[in-house]
Amino acid sequence: MRFFDSYIGMFIAQSVLHSFMTLVIIEIAFYSWEIRDHLAKFRYRLLVLILPIFVFPVYQLINPDRGSMYFRENTAILNFNGWLAIKLWDIIPVYSLFLAFLSGTALIFFLQEIFPIVREKLPKPGYVSYVVPHRDIIGMIEGLCKKLGTSKPSVRIVDEPYPMLFTTGIKNHVIILSKALLDKFTDDQMESALAHEIVHIVRGSSIKTQIIYILRMLMFYNPVSLIEFRRLVQDDEFICDDITVSLTKKPEALISAIKAFYSHPKEDARSKVSVMKDTIESHSHNLLLKERIVKIQEKEIEDTPGFGWVKFILTTLIILKINYMVV
């Protein structure tokens, strides 16, 4: 329990609590002000990742006595340390369960986020280049880039037996797609899929995702940050889908293109744990694809409403005020 009375302990405990309070407040804002636009939700949800990292040291600079017993008992609306000191059934201290919970979240982070990155860095066979036959992919990309007013990215076709399409690079972007995708997609499907990737480039999704990921890494023990990171990535996909449909006017083509990326894991000679992990990841991946399809089907092509900065600033001030009173 002494750990949570230290500066680092208070930061860890309060950052989790502040993340949760921020999440609750913005969800109330979404409901109260009927905020449905994914770009607006993306900006609001950034608060869940950003504010808890910085507000605790700022609060302590403003009031060094904020962690004192007097402040906790007489000013704060929630004294989290008081809850941590409780013993369940007079045996199990709540702070030990809280530490176990944070440790479990950190373990999930390293298994799901860090381990795959390390695995990708290990030596593996390079992609085999494939010459594009009978399909004017370059012309299609040039036409889409002209509509969006952006420079044309490079394209690389790789000889892979499964559908694959993604964009790499921050300044010099490269769209990588597989021969299987090229052979499988119709022109409309290919146009929609490429438009989605180009929209990602125009929006700077690569650098945004990396910045958000760094924020997520700083809060590796925080379960709320884990959840909101994934929701931010989902919102970015929804935004790009909306822009793609507005650009191509072919929602069904984008839907059929998305369906091609459904994951179907097969049980093989690997361990049951490895198979179970792949099955869970595949299920999560497919759920996002299904949600993207539902959003496209429900979305009417219309002008995106302007972002309500007054509401956003008001929500931020409410979050800052309430979290100051939560220690």
Image (tube, rainbow, N blue to C red):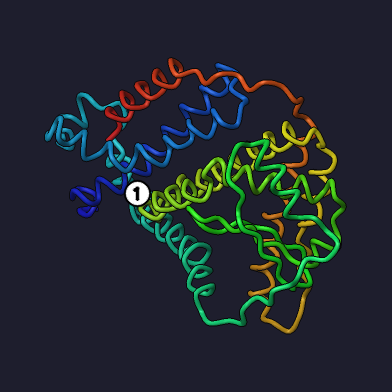
Residue drawn at (21%, 35%) of the image: 58
Query: Crowding near pointer 1: few (<14 within 10 Å), some, many (20+)?
Result: few
Residue at 35 percent across and 37 percent down: it is: 51
Q: Is residue 43 left or right of residue 281?
A: left
> Identity of the amino acid at label 1?
Lys
Relative image position of residue 290 (x, y in whole percent) = 76, 46
Q: Is residue 32 left or right of residue 100?
A: right
Name the spot of residue 61 as percent of width and height, x first.
14, 35
Task: Identify the residue at horizontal 65%, vertical 75% (top origin).
Answer: 127
User: Could you tell whether 35 is left or right of 1 in the image?
Assistant: right
- x, y percentage for residue 159? 74, 73
Which image quadrant for residue 17?
top left
> Residue tagged by mark 1?
87
Q: Which residue is most to the left?
A: 64
For image coordinates 79% across by 51% down, the residue present is 190
Judge by depth and name the residue closer to the eye, 190 or 18.
190
